[in-house]
Image (cartoon, grey):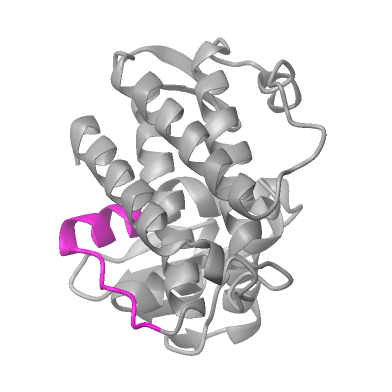
Amino acid sequence: MAPAQHLEWFEDNINWFSDHATIEVLATDVPRCPGWTVENVLTHLAVGLGLGYPHALRSAPGTPDNEAFADVPWPAALPGGAGAIELFEREMLSCLEIFRATDPDWPCYAYGGSATAAFWFRRAAIETSLHRLDVADALGGAPSPLPVDRLEDAIDESIGFALPLARRWSGAESLPGVTVRPSGLDPVPLGDGPAVATISGEGVELLDALWGRSTDRVMISGDRHVALRWLKVVEQAFAGR
């Protein structure tokens, strides 16, 4: 997908949260994010993404992970109630505005290395999609399936970016190789050496598994223990990020 499409996707998700994350539902538990409420999801996105991602654009390529966000003005305390909604809308719309004003080819920091601004446009679209699915599930409505192009892009990013990085961050470098087989797409190898397991699935079910939400609706063949360890690394590595 092109950077402009990622920004459109990001804006769609911001608007969905603005429509659905009302005062009445802020205290609702979000089972897919254990220990969190809808309010926690909003403040997580507002601060971690809305405040943090624009600062990544200002960090030079190759900046160490522990220095890239050193100058972000993290709030001393997070507001609750209507303040959480206001914080979300303010910071997310500000982030979107900064993205729109930034050349997608602008070189900048990315987790574990270097990238261009387009990396963060895509990351913002996909992260807000995952949390949109979390909140939609918590509110009891069947979440609208992602359009095919967005779903394929999210799965591709999970396999190409999130899983390999999470493997390093979570200390799981020694995990043997596995194959991820999305329905209707080419199989993708992960890790080093011959695959000892295959993880197969389709649609949102596979995306959920890759991001540590649920493994109930994917098929695992081969070494199940290794496959399940792979499916936990993103949850472990990205917790709180």
What stretch of residues is rendered in magenta?
141-157
* In the image: residue 155, left or right of residue 135: left
Left or right of residue 119: residue 75: right
- Please give the name of the residue rendered at 58% of the width and 13% of the height, measured from the top-left corner: 59
Say if residue 1 shows up in the picture.
yes
Q: Position of residue 17 (x, y in %)?
A: 41, 56
Where the C terminus falls, by quadrant?
top right
Residue 211: where, in percent of width, then height? 52, 64
Question: Can you name the residue that lies furthest to the right here?
Answer: 76
**73 lies left or right of 117:** right
Looking at the rendered image, the quarter that the N terminus falls into is top left
Residue 30's place in the image compared with 177, above or below, is: below
Residue 112 is situated, as x and y percent measured from the top left of the image, at: 60, 31
Q: Position of residue 136 (x, y in %)?
A: 42, 73
Residue 36 lies in quadrant:
bottom right
The image quadrant of residue 181 is bottom left
User: Magenta includes 147?
Assistant: yes
